[in-house]
Amino acid sequence: MPFVGDMERAENSVREDIRVPLIQLKEAFVHGNGDAGEHTHESSGKPWMVYLSTSVAVCGAYEFGAFVGYTSPTEAAITEDLGLSTAEYSLFGSLLSIGAMIGAITSGPIADFIGRKGAMGVYGAFCAAGWLAIYFAQGVFVLDIGRLAGGYGMGALSYVVPVYIAEIAPTNLRGALTSLNQVMICTGVSAVYILGIVLTWRALALTGLIPCAFLLFGLFFIPESPRWLAKRGDQKEFEVALQKLRGKDADITCEATGIQNYIEELQQLPKANVLDLFQRRYRRSVIVGIGLMIFQQLGGIGGISFYSSSIFESAGISSTIGTTTYACIQIPITIIGVTLIDKAGRKPLLLVSATGLALGCVLAAISFYLKAHELAVKAAPILALTGILVYIASFAAGLGAIPWVVMSEIFPLNIKGIAGSLATLVNWFCSWAVSYTFNFLMSWSNYGTFVLYAAVNALAVIFVVKIVPETKRRTLEAIQAAITA
């Protein structure tokens, strides 16, 4: 059980004023089935403000899904109305990933400088501007500017939203609430797919303004992240925000002391830069955070989600039936994953998810192999549909949400901005690489493409077993102290 050893090494590296809380956390872990911090940092207050704050924040996650899904139902209409060539529309679609990569680079430093709430407001405004530009576009230039602006806001929100939720949530709810980020991404994708059937492409763009309005308006009623306030030295605002989140009758003394002591320890370290991420103390957290982002994307999700219609058609399945089933299945499966993440834990769900992804790819590969060699002609389409649905369900159950959850948990506050930006940038770069190369790979070999993705997902299983720690029911301070020991 390597995490216990990490905890012991962490205790030897921290100051005396946080030694006792960490020892208590370790004892709770050893004698209480890993529920470190469960008894010390759960509040007795009603966390209605946590739920409200999370509901506001995940409007940004809906924007993520809406922008990703927008190009699928609107391709024919936009191309015809604006007279775009296939190359021009492909550029329009790809600008989302480019904007997201730019957003990823700036998201961490900006969120550290102006706060999590301020950052969500700025990026929500970029998303709103993007939708408006798309709605009013009369030519390719304004259309592309809108897509780029939306991609920038969306890419930055993909980092800030889970970080904010993780920093405000009680330990026993953190995993489930952070996973709502992925639920809302799936909801955004599915909603755009369905609404795109009945709405024009301009009207569909206007629907993207609704969650933006909820986000920007809701920010006036929710507190800033207490951990960010404590890091900034705003003692009074820190206590007010934490009390508001835990309930007016809740005793926040223990949690506040733990947060402040840990931040005081971090503030003795020099200001972090990119090169600091390669220091030995941060190496494991960076490997875990970036590694999960790489495996999340290189397992093929970008290509399969962006080109699902063509995959189903290539396999001999109605694209309408395939994509509708795709859109409907991911939301309930993601919700099931959310209900299990704080009970089963992050690591078991990641293992189940990666295994299911590999299995889904193998089934799809077998289907395309049978079709290419004209074997079991009637069974091949059913096998392909089964494989893709197993893949989507497995992704929704674990690797879709949990890498963002773990990323928000493992980086210490002094490197969270830089490390989080790097992890988000890597995620979006890998997403672009997969979506860009997918059609080339499918032209090379349909079944070979899915064999390649199956191999990547098999490697993900090994990575999770060997490298990724379990973070269920542990305080952020205990997780970060252990992993950087």
Image (cartoon, rainbow, N blue to C red):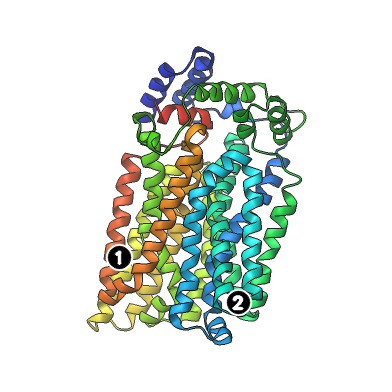
Asked whether 477 or 102 is in front, the reply is 102
Residue at image location 48% in from the left, 30% down from the top: 271
Using the image, determine if residue 261 lies above or below residue 178. Answer: above
Picture coordinates of residue 366, whole percent (x, y): 28, 71
Residue 294 in the figure: left or right of residue 62 = left
On-image quarter of the C terminus? top left
Residue 438 showing in the rendered view: yes
Using the image, determine if residue 397 lies above or below residue 50. Answer: below
Q: Which residue is mark 2?
A: 196
Quarter of image, res 264: top right
Amino acid at pointer 1 = Val
On-image quarter of the N terminus? top left
Residue at image location 42% in from the left, 64% down from the top: 302
Q: CA distance from mark 1 to mark 2?
A: 32 Å
Where disc 2 sits, the SS reads: helix
Asked whether 71 or 380 is in front, the reply is 71
